[in-house]
Image (spheres, grey):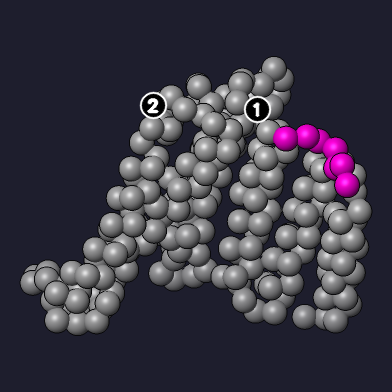
Amino acid sequence: MHWQIEFLLFAILIVAALIALNLRNLLAAVVTLTIFSFMVALLMISMGAVDVGFTEAVVGAGIVGIYFVAAIFKTTRKSED
Amino acid sequence: MTGQTHSPIIEVAGRGLAPIIQLIGIYVFFHGHYGPGGGFQGGVLLAAGVLLLRMTVGAENSQAHVAAKRTLTNCAIGAVIFVGTGIVAILGGGYFLDYAHLPVQWLEPAYMRYYGILFVELGITLGVMTGLITIYDDILEVDYA
């Protein structure tokens, strides 16, 4: 794998993590966390661990997002701290 | 989020996408021998299809697909299939999950390993799929028992 592609993936990963930490809107933070999870999956696949990347993509980008949205639906949409 | 959506676009998209996601889940489950994938990933994909239906057509209308009152029982059945296969292998004289010692007389050990791991992955798929649906139903307090 070319190092430029991995560098781009790492850059998007760190930027997505920082945005998800600083957002006040929790629904947008969940979407950003999904981007983080998908970038982790792409990095795993680029390192040769296809099975781990597949699990990360399916669980992190699919199921965990649904659970977070359901939890936000039960509480409030805005962060209060 | 528990009720039916008011947008016809979201409803049609959810009803069209859910069977395709579940078909991919079944493919991943059966293709786990030869490539990436297996019981856990297949079970999560099967659960994702059901959760998409739960969110789009509503929790009440998707009860005919997978009923909320049966999910926890099926999760326990999947766990019993997984652990029971291992314990039967111990009783047959081998180690835990040693498929060659399963008490199936008419199969060669190679085929016994082949079908044994398929049986174990069936239990994992059933347990993971119904377990994830149970977690979603408990978060949103869907109770139609």
Q: Position of residue B99 (x, y in %)?
A: 24, 75
Name of the residue lying farthest toward the left: B105
In the rendered image, the quadrant that contains the N terminus of chain B is top right
Q: Secondary structure at mark 1?
A: loop
Circle 2 sits on which residue? Answer: B145
Identified by mark 1, the residue type is Met
Say if the magenta span includes residue B107: no
Q: Residue at x 71, y 24 (%)?
A: B9
Q: Which residue is mark 1?
A: B1
Q: Is residue B15 left or right of residue B69?
A: right
Q: Which residues are magenta?
A: A75-81
Instruction: Give the left or right position of residue B131, taking residue B102 as reference.
Output: right
Q: Position of residue A40 (x, y in %)?
A: 73, 67
Classify residue A74 by image quadrant.
top right
Chain at tag 2: B
Drawn side of residue B125 relative to residue A41, left or right: left
